[in-house]
Image (cartoon, grey):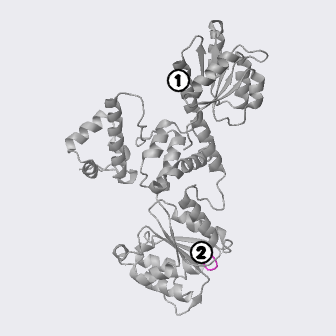
Amino acid sequence: MSAAIRRVLLVDDDADFRRATEQSLALQDIAVDAFGQARAALDFLPPDYDGVVVSDVRLPGMDGLELFRALRERDADLPVILITGHGDIDMAVRAMQEGAYDFLAKPYSGARLLNAVRNACGQRRLVLENRRLQAAAQAVDDELPLVGESPAMQRLRQTLRHIADADVDVLVEGETGTGKEVVAASLHRLSHRSRRAFVALNCAALPESVLESELFGHEPGAFTGAHKRRIGSIEYASGGTLFLDEIESMPASAQTRLLRVLETRSVTPLGSNDVRPVDLRVVAATKADLGDPGSRGGFRADLYYRLNVVTLRLPPLRERREDIPLLYAHFAARAAARFRREAPPPDEAVRACLDTHDWPGNVRELAHYAERQVLGVPQPEAARADDSPGTLPQRVERYEAQLIRQALMRHGGDVRATIEALGIPRKTFYDKLQRHAIDRSEYIPEKSKAPHA
């Protein structure tokens, strides 16, 4: 997030008033760019000015209203606060209807000016931050679409470029939703293999018999139902890249055959004695720590060491929180193009969610959140800002509702798991659902919606 904005472009032809206002704002650590004429201020103003404008309405030459309209043409989101005398209030009201941020009628207190400037600076900060994120999201390298400015992501992109043409097998470790397939596809695109096939296979999605046939291929009659020859993924990926997702789920028999393929760079289809050479690069992905014998389970140690020529670890979002706003902007822009809608700028509620939510589903969860924002779908799980207006009991109530929604989301609406996580009795849980108007059914995945105990 960008730092707080504390800068004012002040325009007033009264030198004494200008000097006094500048000193008053400077005491509050607010920098002032002061001008006596509107034209000079307009000539000075840089694009994306990191501040707000405070201008008297009555000025020699170009008056404050003309200045406001000229500023609107340059930057419609630049907050402009107009200073008016008693006879100029109607004019200032019309300017507000045209988009002026505020007006101060003379005489006004220093506190009134300071409050208006602080609020306007807060709005300007949000606008400029949104612009920066949108520009960064649009500048994402299509060749290497791994979004993030954190040191971990910068190192990852550098490593991918370094090893892309090295033809080494790669093991990618990371939680669900961190983008392991994106890494594998990026390696393929950056390598000399990019003109050949990128073949992806999820080892957890197929039963053992089907997986071996998919991987190694088979000849007619190799097993019941094998009526014709099938080229396996390994042979089909020759010259290109084979991506094996969730490799920790691969059955033991398939592991043994895969180890042989990696050692000999050849494959023997099921039901055949033919040994066929393959020019293969394997990128394997796992959400388990295969280097830890306790976490490895039934996965062969020798296959792990054979795959572990280069290991890339993808950090979860909670370990690179500085990337979340940029990722959100990227996914929102992508969703806006897909759905042919305008991407709404993130408001304080969205920013609070981005700042405080743990994102257990990682990048995939954040992408879906951005899509729902673009579509205007209610976000029951969105967090609220800790500094939202209201009394302490009201803010505590909002925070309690936020925690309940997050627990329901993590446990798919399951009552038993949710109340255990929250540590409250069942009756208290249902009372709180009613008080906060929380519909538990919104958190139950569509494919598994059924009454819970």
Q: Is residue 240 magenta?
A: yes
63 with respect to 361 (left or right): right
Q: Is residue 127 magenta?
A: no
Residue indicated by mark 1: 115
State the residue lying farthest toward the right.
Answer: 61
> Residue 104 appears at what percent x and percent y?
59, 16
Q: Locate residue 72 relative to residue 247 in the image: left or right.
A: right
2 or 1: tag closer to the N-terminus: 1
Above or below 235: residue 156: above
Q: Residue at x 35, y 35 (%)?
A: 398
Task: Examine the rendering and report whether any part of residue 152 can be seen.
Answer: yes
* Label 1 crowd bin: few (<14), some (14–19), many (20+), radius 10 Å: few
Label 2 amino acid? Answer: Thr
Are circles 2 and 1 on residues that touch, CB within 8 Å?
no
Q: How far apart are marks 2 and 1 (CA)?
A: 60 Å
Residue 227 seen in the current view:
no
Q: Main secondary structure of the magenta part?
A: loop
Residue pictured at 43% horizontal, 52% vertical:
359
Foreground mark, 2 or 1? Answer: 1
Secondary element under disc 1, as helix, strand or loop, is: helix
Q: Which of 154 and 369 is in front in this view?
A: 154
The stretch in magenta equals 237-241
Q: Is 247 rendered above or below residue 33?
A: below
Question: Local crowd at mark 2 within 10 Å, few (<14), some, or many (≥20)?
Answer: many
Q: What residue type is labelled 1?
A: Asn
Give the position of the N terminus as an image quadrant: top right
